[in-house]
Amino acid sequence: MSYKYIKFEVEDHVALITVNRPKALNALNSDTLREIEKAVEDIASDDSIYIMVFTGEGKSFVAGADIGEMKGFTAEEARRFAKLGHQVFNRISSLCKPSIAAINGYALGGGCELALACDIRIASNKVRMGQPEVGLGITPGFGATKRLVEVVGQAKAKELIFTGEYLNAEEALKIGLVNKVVDMDELMPVTMKMAQTMASKAQLALRYSKLAIEQSIYADHQTASHIETSAFALCFANEDQKEGMSAFLEKRNPDFKCK
Ligand code: DAK
């Protein structure tokens, strides 16, 4: 499939999805969401892709859902639009392959929610992040009332959603909304270096780790212990565990094979 609103590139096991509507600051319309969904499905089914990275073209990561498209929605159309956004973002967060948001600029509303759907958020020093929806007469629609609370806690999430105020990079870092802040020209090199570090590890172990974390978030301690025990035991059913441990004992780099 050729894409109109995103760029999709793969190099060294890492897929890079760049939202590419710079004239609208990469606002997410339905077609862009569908293209992201298609790209994520391709990533899911391609064994040679280990890690996915999201970024935005130009000065914005994603400046939100497309206000022009949403303005005339009926309640039913709004429901369908929100459902599409949830479907795409849930697919990103639940896919066992790790995701990194390389946040280059505005990450507002649906843009902040796209970043929140990713496992790791790396911000440039130029970012502005927030949930301005109440200023438009709507609630967040693509997951912030849940994921923002999980990431920064209820008090900060409520403050951001109720005031609609934007955070700069240092403020986002301080509340744990992003993992790290780097200079703009370092954003992609730092992101790709982290992606390559992940890609160099045993991929099944990495995916089991992600699944165990995701499944344990809402589980009680006993259930979480069972989940982790099973994930750990499963690693011994694939050859990468033997290779990783042999390599350590033989003082050489491991050559992982499992995809
Ligand atoms: N949608 C559509 N177009 C947008 C846009 C957006 N979110 N953000 C920017 N643009 C467009 C502008 O209209 C402008 O287009 P032209 O006038 O050139 O045709 C172009 O991008 C450049 O924008 P500006 O001229 O405004 O650029 P500035 O540098 O002056 O300002 C800004 C940058 C990011 C501060 C400003 O553009 C801005 O405030 N943008 C809107 C940010 C925002 O409010 N984002 C949240 C959107 S609401 C739901 C489903 C989903 C959602 C909620 C509910 N349900 C169905 C329940 C999600 C909601 C959102 O994400």
Image (spheres, rainbow, N blue to C red):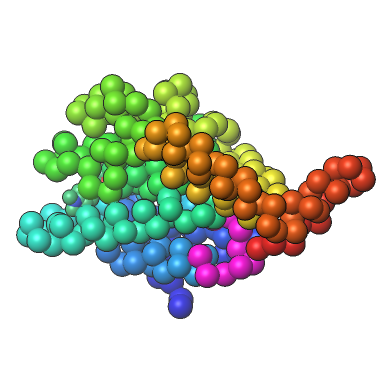
Which residue: 32% across, 32% down? 149
When the figure is inspected, residue 87 is found, relative to residue 63, above or below; the finding is below
Q: Is residue 93 above or below residue 38?
A: above
The percent coordinates of residue 118 (x first, y second) are 45, 46
Q: Is residue 28 magenta?
A: no
Q: Position of residue 177 (x, y in %)?
A: 42, 31
Residue 195 place in picture, x, y as percent: 63, 48
Camera sees residue 189 = no
Assess whether residue 51 is covered by the magenta stretch. yes
Q: With 121 as the anchor, is 64 left or right in this view?
A: left
Say which residue appears at 47% left-offset and 56% top-offset: 95
* Nearest to the observer: residue 27 or residue 174: 174
Question: How many labels sit on residues?
Answer: 0
Q: Residue at x 50, y 41 (%)?
A: 226
Quarter of the image for residue 157 reads top left
Q: Is residue 149 above or below residue 40?
A: above
Q: In this orientation, which residue lies closer to the viewer: 199 or 210?
A: 210
Q: Residue 174 placed where, x, y %? A: 45, 21
Q: Where's the C terminus, which quadrant?
A: bottom right
Whether residue 183 is visible: yes
Q: Nearer the viewer, residue 249 or 168?
A: 249
Q: Quadrant of the N terminus?
A: bottom left
Residue range of the region highlighted in magenta in the rendering: 44-52
Nearer to me, 239 or 233: 233
Q: Residue furthest bottom?
A: 1
Residue drawn at x 43%, y 53% as measured from the top left: 94
Farthest residue in the left direction?
74
In the image, taking residue 61 as reference, residue 87 lies left or right, namely left
For this view, does 190 lie left or right of residue 31? Answer: right
Quadrant of residue 220 within the rendered picture = top left
